[in-house]
Amino acid sequence: MRWSQTLIPTMKETPEGAEIPSHVLMLRAGLIQQVMAGAYTYLPLGWRALRKAEAIVRDEMDRAGGVELHMPALTPITLWERTGRKEAFGSVLINFKVRRANREIHLALGPTHEEVITDLVSRFVSSYRQLPITLYQIQTKFRNEERPRFGVLRTSEFLMKDAYSFDTSVESLAASYDRMYAAYCRIFERCGLEYLAVEAESGPIGGDASHEFMVLADNGEDVVVHCPACGYAANLERAEIGAAKSGAAKAIGSATLQKVDTPKVGSIEQVSKLLGCQPAQMIKTLIYVADDKPLAVLLRGDHDANEGKLRRAVGATKLELASPAVIEQVTKAPVGFAGPVGLSIPLWADRDVAAVADAVVGANEADKHYTGANLGRDFTVAADHFADLRNAGAGDACPRCGQSLALRHAIEVGHVFKLGTKYSDALGAKFLDDTEQQRTIIMGCYGIGINRILASLIETRHDEQGIVWPMALAPYEVLLAPLNVAQEDVMQAAEQLHDELTAAGIDVLLDDRDQRAGVKFKDADLIGFPLRVVIGGRSLKEGKLEIKWRWESEPTLIPLEGAAAALAELVRKARETPNTAK
Ligand code: ATP
Ligand code: MG
């Protein structure tokens, strides 16, 4: 390909509205163009990189025994109603009515495809002899995200690889899951991504039933809890806290319980400022409704409740923060003044609450708090109502080895999940087992955001000058940069190299623009082609070419004679080591 014949609109300036490096660089390098918030055109270079990521994903899915098919993005709303997900997705589900002749049809654009695929399987799979099977597609998904942002990291239309496994037993599901998990590891390795597979909130199967594949990046929207000592990794929703440090001994203070005025001041921050205490000296009281019954949860003022942990501890299927009306009803006070003293609904407490002596708590009265509140004296919590109910924080004890946990920001690039029978139950996907018994198919689902592969890669592999592509995903592997395109011998050498490399199966771009070397080099570094070959100047007169890897600072010389073969060999070697580009 010749530069002059494709479309590469590079930009010198940082585009407005782009906040993070991957977004800035994808725009500046001419990989994408924003059509509207959350929707991007992939320009020729971006599209090439995306297709390469897609090809790696497809290759590994096939290798893991996945079978590719393709489902429509347009789906009937009735399918989503049957599983209750029309409601669960809420405004994220893009759905609308169209007229066809004199009928009105209600459609939804698939945000994912469990419904469509399970319906398909329910129609065509009926015997254990057809199972297990893993079906997958690489297709556009639609989600009306509340806040599309960070370029292609979070868009309302994106390319996903979604796979679904169908098994006859939990053991067989585990085998399908492990195959997908291993395929994911190979995919992200081949893409040159440094990732962590973290335990994530699991569904009905429980245990080790869900993992997210995370790329550590300061601008990631997710938080990963990681133990550098033993390798334990979980997302924030899921991460447990070891008992070592957090189950601190019970503390009994000596202050007397005193009601104080805190006019119009309800938040932890405001109250601690007003009363001159640390948030850690406060106990906050949150009112939840668990399966329609209110309960109160006590947490140290500087800690955040973890609703997943709370739901499991309480044994509820549905749990949500109480509405202001319910809070006022159970505390007899406006929102912001709930406290444990004198509260008559069940009390639960995070383990760390036991260590807060002489605490500041709400007084269940408008504009009032208590100081000097002590557990055991002023309020009590049943021993079996103490649990790990909060989000892990940096420095908390690792649940496996007791060492300090670290918190890191990360980007979720993929997710594997043991679904169980949620969709097969709802949509009647059953099979006859070898004793002619009818049973429900057990499912798993496995997603990868193809766009996020690119964005997270760029987010973690760039320098001041631009992107640093690994071979595997680079839009072109080699850039040929003739110094003076008006010079016949220069262009002739460049053209010949271009043709020979192309014939050798190398992705090569020839920068045939009539531009100064400086401009060409800047663009080459901005886009980040792995190998840059300069043709011209004194080196060419000496029968040499100057080559430079994007991740190295100094060029080296190679003889012009036999250059195509030598370059092809270099590229092939670099293809085998996706992590060369650091
Ligand atoms: P998130 O929590 O980031 O919204 P999710 O957990 O809802 O993502 P899944 O339903 O697990 O996403 O989808 C599978 C994969 O699709 C994700 O791991 C992610 O890589 C990708 N993905 C999800 N939402 C988006 C989006 N809005 N834009 C781009 N990629 C996305
Ligand atoms: Mg997910």
Image: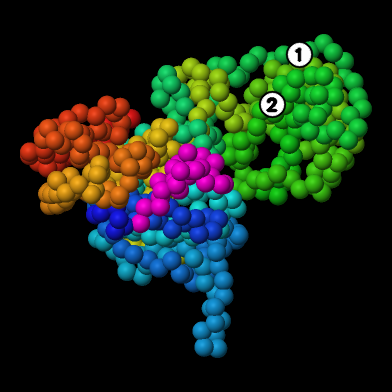
Q: Please identify, in this view, whether the residue under mark 2 or under mark 1 is nearer the observer.
A: 2
Above or below for 426 versus 518: below
Residue 540 visible: yes
Looking at the rendered structure, the secondary structure element under dot 2 is loop
Q: Residues within 10 Å of mark 1 (few under 14, many from 20)?
A: some
Check the picture and name the quadrant holding the C terminus: top left
Majority secondary structure of the magenta segment? Answer: loop
Magenta residues, as a range? 7-30
Residue 479: image x %, image y %? 25, 44
Per the model, the C-alpha gap separating discs 2 and 1 is 20 Å
Q: Nearer the viewer, residue 413 or 330?
A: 413
* x 75%, y 20%: residue: 278
Image quarter for residue 423? bottom left
Residue at far front of view: 487
| Residue 547 position (above or below residue 404) | below
Residue matched to label 1: 252
The residue located at (24%, 33%) in the rendering is: 548
Q: Which of 216 and 460 lies nearest the eye of the viewer?
A: 460
Q: Amino acid at mark 1?
A: Ile
Q: Is mark 1 within 8 Å of ligand 1?
A: no
Measured along the vertical axis of the image, is residue 331 above or below residue 45? above
Q: Per the image, is 27 magenta?
A: yes
Identify the coloring.
Answer: rainbow
Left or right position of 279 against 139? right
Where does label 2 land, which residue? 302
The residue that appears at 11% across and 35% down in the rendered structure is 543
